[in-house]
Amino acid sequence: MSDFSKGLVRSHEFELAVIYRIADLSAIFAVLACLVWWRTGEFEQSFQFLAIGFGMAYLLVAESFSLYRSWRVASVKEQASTTLSVWLVTVALVLAINYFLKISDVYSRLVVGWWLLLTPLVLVAWRLVFRELLALARRSGYNTRRAVIIGVSENALRLHRELISNPDLGLTFAGFFDDRASTRLNKELGEFGEVQPVSKALDMAKNGELNHVYIALPMHAKDRITSYLKLLSDTTCTTFIVPDFFTYNLIHSRWASLGEIQTISVFDTPFRNSASVWVKRIQDVLLASAIILLISPILLAVALGVKLSSPGPVLFKQDRYGLDGKRIRVWKFRSMRVMENGGKVVQATRDDPRITPFGSFIRRTSLDELPQFFNVLMGTMSIVGPRPHAVAHNEQFRQLVDRYMLRHKVKPGITGWAQINGCRGETDTLDKMERRVAYDLEYIQNWSLWMDLKIVYLTVFKGFTGDQAY
């Protein structure tokens, strides 16, 4: 039975982040409750409100410090110091609020003082315990990531030693890969096992069997590195180069470490281990909720129009690729007489006979896209991001357009940088798709909250209609 039967390569980062948040709030609440009961014998309502308010402030500050990112390869000292920093900033923030609102008189200073001193110790302590439990689980083969090393070099061997000697990192080593003749490879490799061709690693990455790929080739092998990076851009693996390094069209690269080995990610996302994740999600939920309330009459009118204009369901659900290339179900108002969602999907063209008269109207005005605001609330899409394509089109263009799959390093969006720059409608030529992908990657490389707001603003005026929308 393979490792995959145990689910060893599944991502648990979201679940762990939820656990961390719940545990932090519980610790903040429990320490205060114990102190109040010790002092007065009753956990008064005013103290309950204090714990809830302080907890919410703590979570907001924690997001700005990226406290809930993955700490898999970070030191205990770094995690503890970040936790304490978040607590201190939260205390300073609450004290500043108290200074202006004058609300401290209702609370026992002794209780609050001990609470502010003891709680950070509890927050650090439970993290240390949980870290040890995670390490034990990873040593047992759970909550792991599968990693390979391309290239047999001194750096590759050092990286391998770090992987083997640090099982707590939860990185399962899946082998060395190199195309050079065995006579040219490092003689020390004998103790580590067989070297396989790089093409096999690339196939594994493309099939979703790998999470991390480390390229450990010397700088003079830049042509081979460039070739591998180009091929890996057709996957959603997080790709690292182990210095000596040569980078190729970086997508949000950042320094990282595996034990004592420094690496640089080449194809990554702007929303990895960052407060940006929190900012982006809040923006999406607030905007989507407000827009749905505002357009609810339009939603009802369009739904009625679809139902009365042609037989069939009101909504059309089609499989698309979402974040990290995982399949999602995207909702649209039905605009055609057919429901294509298989291995072959024909793009809509001008005067397409499959499009109903009412469907033509809602496609030209982008009203057919409105149900995707519910996809945003569900978390499978974002307000702004690369437009999702049908799975059949993804499989077609990933073979023709360089770095095409890197569009999926962020959530797909209802509108995007490409759309407000005129890339809407049918992509009947390779040049059109290359232009759209170029804008999508430019968005990923330059993302900011203000860029999202700019795109939303411009979409209102020129992003919903166009000559190419049919």
Image (cartoon, grey):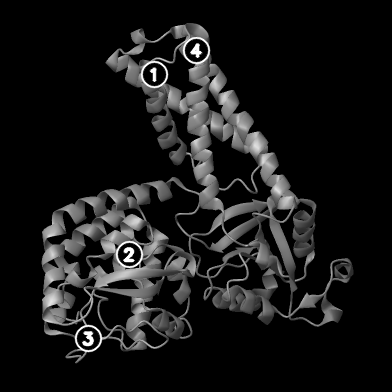
**Residue located beneath label 2 in the image:** 413
Amino acid type, residue under disc 2 in the picture: Gly
Q: How many marks?
A: 4
Amino acid type, residue under disc 4 in the picture: Trp
Please provide percent x and percent y for residue 203.
62, 79
Please provide percent x and percent y for residue 279.
37, 47
- Residue at 65% x, 78% y is 224
Q: Quadrant of the C terminus?
A: bottom left
Q: Quadrant of residue 179?
A: bottom right
Q: Secondary structure at mark 4?
A: helix
Q: Relative to 230, is 94 on the left or the right?
A: left
Between 282 and 92, which is closer to the camera in this rendering?
Answer: 282
Please, is residue 289 above or below residue 392 in the view? above
**Residue located beneath label 1 in the image:** 95
Q: Mark 3 packing: few (<14 Cα in 10 Å), some, or many (20+)?
A: some
Q: Relative to 458, is 3 on the left or the right?
A: right
**2 or 1: tag closer to the N-terminus:** 1
Residue 113 is at least partly visible in this image: no
- Residue at 48% x, 11% y is 111
**Residue located beneath label 4 in the image:** 37
Q: Quadrant of residue 196?
A: bottom right
Which circle, 2 or 3, is nearer the viewer? 3
Disc assigned to residue 191: none
Between 438 and 165, which is closer to the camera in this rendering?
Answer: 165
Q: Secondary structure at mark 2?
A: strand
**4 or 1: tag closer to the N-terminus:** 4
Disc assigned to residue 337: 3
Separation of residues labelled 4 and 1 (CA atoms): 23 Å
Please provide percent x and percent y for residue 227.
60, 79
Mark 4 touches mark 2? (CB < 8 Å): no
